[in-house]
Image: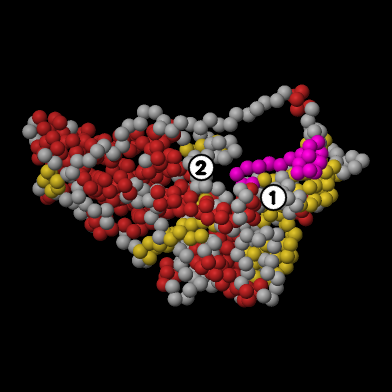
Amino acid sequence: MSSKFYITTPIYYVNDIPHIGHAYTTIIVDALARFHRLLGQEVFFLTGTDEHGQKIEQAAAKKGKNPKEYVDEISKRFKDIWESFGISYDKFIRTTDSYHIQTAQKAFLKMYQRGDIYKGEYEGNYCISCEAFFTKSQLIEGGRCPDCKKETTLVKEESYFFKLSAYQERLLEFYKQHSDFIFPKSRYNEVIRFIEDGLEDLSITRTSFDWGVKLPSEIANKDSKKHIMYVWLDALINYLSALGYENESDDKMEFWPVNYHIVGKDILRFHAIYWLAFLMSLELPLPRHIAAHGWWTKDGAKMSKSVGNVVNPQEIVNAYGLDCFRYFILREVSFGQDGDFSQKALIERINADLSNDLGNLLNRLLGMSAKYFNNHLRVDIQAFKAHYKEELESIHKILMGLELLMQEVQIHRYLEELWKIFALANGMIAKKEPWRLVKEDKMQEVAELLVFIANLLIKAAFCLSPCMPKTAKEILDVFNIPLESKHYLEFIKNNQIISEMVLMPIMALFPKIETPLLEEKQIKTQHFITKEEFSKIEIKVGTILGAEIMPKSEKLLKLQVDLGEERERQIIAGIKSYYTTQELIGKQVCVLANLKPAKLMGELSEGMILAVSDDDGLSLIQPQAIKKNGSQIS
């Protein structure tokens, strides 16, 4: 086993505040990092924020801020919550950091000089929400993104391309030789199918917006300076820039290749295909593993800020405690599958697993030790090992199997196996009935039982510490044993048993919870209208013939729209932050045609352009196919 261990979260896109999905990924990585520190490895745990791209530029404009002000504010929220959660990261990277920008430019130049980047013209559909391009065959419902289901925008612009197609066979060969590269294994075939369907060269620069990393001067000086890097190329390079790739003397590059990239299933393709191809071009070793987890819903429904059911992890932690939250999200769902959060499920886990199985076991040990032995336990080690030989072997077998489960990112199974130890201990108490042994004056048998439970809790606490660090420390404090790697090796690897100890009483770890501690937010209710009221609405298809900026407005555009009438209509629309005037010309839209005319900033508006707005921004509502201007939607 290498002495160095490198693990990453994705860098989180700063278009909104941290939610339960961000917390889930980060806590998984934190648990893995803590586990490998226990093994005695030197760990480098990277997290951070992804701060460039059109979506960020638009979100900042919507808030009336410049992009840097906006990303500074949101990035700080991520850093603050991870610090309040005790996340043990070693570096927090931002893609606006100067050293990262230099690294991205250096990588771009290397790939360019290698001949893997060339200039051309791109025409295709772009999803602003996913920051991704899609071919016509990949689009759904006539033009929607296959991932987020939102409308895409037809983009035609000069672009630099990465020769992704040149790496198709090499990627397939790599995956055939590394079938365990992706966790869970069910995702492996998904990636293979995508590659086998054919890889097209990837457009890796944009010219239609400004918020991004400029091209290296060696290229920009020969060409125009209007290009910025595709946000995913910029973002993926962070895994190298954090190690000092732009600085040849930085010894942090000794951590490469990364052991695990932990990502959500929605960004697996970018990591498993694009990233590997970039690394091949840079002639760097490939990652050892990529692990893709599922999504979280709330009470069975997809989370949405507009619906009002987004789970704020800080609120949950404030109410129920950090370790309870960590245990729930790591135990509740199999890695790779989607999970559902509810206070009911959280309370059930706390009461059954934490309060009954673990907390009650420690309470019984402390209670009997104080009552019968004044907190001082001592037994003959040889007799004890002989009497509990079978149980000690069962426990050691479980403990020896835990490392593989953690290596395969099966943390839910890791905790399930660990809980078998608590079940065994509780079963021994029921079987031995120490209260009966006391009445029979068999105090040595009682002492042996309590020493058995104590050793079991010590060993389990070390293994529990990656997932529940505060709880593990509190348990080990009972026995005055520090939570350190050397003691993990002694008690777990070397199977150490202690036969004499003085116990330090502590408060009950997990009091029972009878009712939810947080008031459930009221989900926004739908306002119903009658069929008669709906029949009064006229929604027509029209084509935008002209678009110009309203000089004194940050949001408004003045549009000329053909609705198949004798004259064009003038419509004022608040979409300046989301669309350029050039890309609107010729676009068919849906218009609320019988809206009472009104003046906006001195200009007459004769209708309303229909759009959909959600957490990721705004998109115009368009017909799936070209329709005659004036066609009515019914």
Where, by quadrant of the figure, is residue 160 drawn?
bottom right
Judged left or right of residue 21, residue 436 is left
1 and 2 marks in contact (CB < 8 Å): no
Give coordinates of residue 163: x percent, y percent: 65, 68
Give coordinates of residue 596: x percent, y percent: 80, 33
Judged left or right of residue 573, residue 439 is left
- Select label 1 or label 2 by which is in front: 1
Estimate the spatial distance between the alpha carbons at disc 1 and disc 2, rounded to whole Å. Answer: 36 Å
Q: Decide whether the magenta segment is chiefly helix, strand or loop.
A: strand
User: Relative to 430, does residue 578 appear above or below in the rendering?
Assistant: below
The quadrant in which the C terminus is found is top right
Crowd rating for badge 2 (residues with CA inside 10 Å; few <14, some 14–19, many 20+) = many
Of the residues shown, which amino acid type is indicated by label 2? Trp
Range of the magenta residues? Answer: 597-617
Residue beneath disc 2: 296
Q: Which residue lies furthest to the left in this view?
A: 441
Q: Is residue 616 magenta?
A: yes
User: Helix, strand or loop at disc 2?
Assistant: strand
Labelled disc at residue 554: 1
The quadrant in which the N terminus is found is bottom left
Q: Looking at the image, which residue is at 88% across and 41% down?
A: 564
User: Helix, strand or loop at disc 1?
Assistant: loop
Q: Looking at the image, which residue is at 81% across and 36% down?
A: 597
